[in-house]
Image (cartoon, helix red, strand yellow):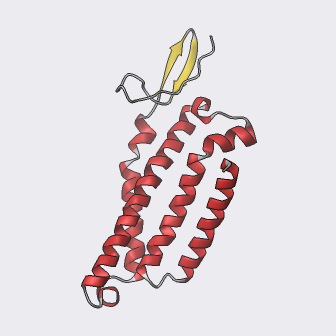
Amino acid sequence: MPKFLVIIIGTLSNLINFFICFNLRKNPTFVFLCYLSILNILLIYHWNADYILRFLFGIDWLNFNILVCKLLNFIQYSSSQSAAWILTLISGEQFLSVKIKLWRSNYFSAKKAFWTAFGLVTLIFLINSNVLIFLGYQEIVNGTLVDFCFNGNVTDYATYYGYVKF
């Protein structure tokens, strides 16, 4: 399936999901699913950012600018981790709803679900903020200043993205 089609179908599906869950937001599970829809839209656009920027603007973001590289990697790390933890919250909330009578009515309202998810996403974004500070470096190669997104010398598994014209 072409990436452009994935972007369109994924965005529309997540927007529809968001509006349905938003209308049902009195249930804490649907509050979590609203957050999940937004995070999934971020993930869709990040995973396809290279395609979008090349197709629409002729830009290779990995070699374009170190700030763009930092920002897009920050979005990737933070939104994918947040989405995974939101799914964990949904599972935990469902488990407690089954095990504890009146869980939702007495202990966990939609408002508490909103603030729990907001706090979780904020915490994950703060934890990953080091990416905005420490990721990437600049080096002079053959008299040209080159931006590198990753340091290839860190581990055998690390890759670096740099563009050097010889």
Which of 42/97 is in front?
97
User: What residue is shown at x 51% (from left), y 60% (from top)?
Assistant: 39
Query: Is 27 in front, or is 125?
Result: 27
Q: Report if residue 104 is visible in the image.
A: yes
Q: Which image quadrant is residue 66 in?
A: top right
- Is 124 left or right of 70, judged from the image as shown? left
Residue found farthest to the front: 1
Q: Inspect this view and state whether residue 119 appears.
A: no
- 154, 13: nearer the viewer: 13
Q: Residue at x 34, y 77 (%)?
A: 94
Residue 130 percent across, percent down from the top left: 39, 42
Q: Residue at x 49, y 48 (%)?
A: 76
Between 6 and 125, the one lying in front of the other is 6
**Quarter occupied by the C terminus:** top right
58 is higher (above) or lower (below) than 21: above
Q: Position of residue 65 (x, y in %)?
A: 59, 32
Query: Where in the figure is residue 14, as x and y percent of width and height?
Result: 59, 66
Picture quadrant of residue 22: bottom right
Q: Is residue 54 left or right of residue 112?
A: right
- Classify 92 as above or below 81: below
**Which quadrant of the view contains residue 146?**
top right
Q: How many marks?
A: 0
Furthest toward the left, the residue is 100
Where residue 99 appears, as percent x and y from the top left, is 25, 83
